Image (cartoon, rainbow, N blue to C red):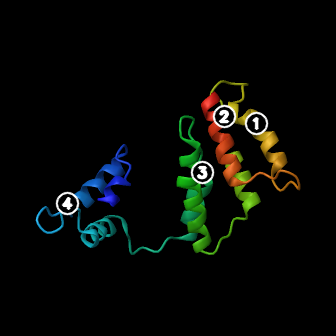
Amino acid sequence: MQLIQAMDTSTEKGKVAFYKVKSAMDKTNYRCGHFANAWEKLRAKYETDKKPDLQEEQEKYYSKWMKEKKSPETFILGMMEIMRSKLENLGEVIPEDKFIKDLILKLPKSKAAGQLSPYQLKADAWKARVGAEVDPLTVEDLTTEYDDVSEEG
């Protein structure tokens, strides 16, 4: 039951996963769900035997950009941190400072010619804090500050 409650059913993938887990519930023997069966259904759906390719994962990482209406927290923690971990598992370590600079470069750009997006207006200040001795910028700080800008704009 807790597995179902943890799912984000507002997305298509979340709905599919929800129904996979729900189908493992047996009202007679496992009223609250059969975790092993649910997990096996999720694993069968999402796990692959294909080993990730370093070059493919690099291309995915470097081609990702934050969309204008995307949640900064989802973009950083739900997407970029996962991609960074995949690359690390394949032998390519992205140091914290480089990762933060990458995130700053992946900010949404203004669609209006000659104008900067609210994120771009803050980019120079954020870059100056990367690796600073006093008040260095962390991924958590950047996530929070992205959220603040997102709420302002």
18 or 1: nearer the viewer = 1
Residue 75, given in percent of the width and then of the height, sits at 56, 48
75 relative to 69, above or below: below
* Image-based side of 58 in relation to 16, left or right: right
Give SS at disc 1.
helix
Whole-angstrom CA distance, mark 3 to mark 2, is: 14 Å
Q: Nearer the viewer, mark 1 or mark 2?
A: 2
Q: Residues within 10 Å of mark 3 (few under 14, many from 20)?
A: many
- Disc 4 and disc 2 in contact, CB within 8 angstroms: no
Whole-angstrom CA distance, mark 4 to mark 3, is: 32 Å
5 or 122: nearer the viewer = 5
* Image-based side of 40 in relation to 77, left or right: left
The residue wearing badge 4 is 23
Give SS at disc 3.
helix
* N-term-proximal mark, 4 vs 1: 4
The residue wearing badge 1 is 122
- Disc 1 and disc 2 in contact, CB within 8 angstroms: yes
Q: Quadrant of residue 32?
A: bottom left
What kind of residue is marked 4? Answer: Ser
Q: Is residue 54 visible?
A: yes
Residue 33, given in percent of the width and then of the height, sits at 23, 64
The residue wearing badge 2 is 149
Q: Number of labelled discs?
A: 4
The residue wearing badge 3 is 76
Question: Residue at the spot x=69%, y=41% of the render?
Answer: 145
* N-term-proximal mark, 4 vs 2: 4
* N-term-proximal mark, 3 vs 2: 3
54 relative to 19, above or below: below
- Disc 3 and disc 2 in contact, CB within 8 angstroms: no
Q: Residues within 10 Å of mark 4 (few under 14, many from 20)?
A: some
What kind of residue is marked 3? Answer: Ile
* N-term-proximal mark, 1 vs 3: 3
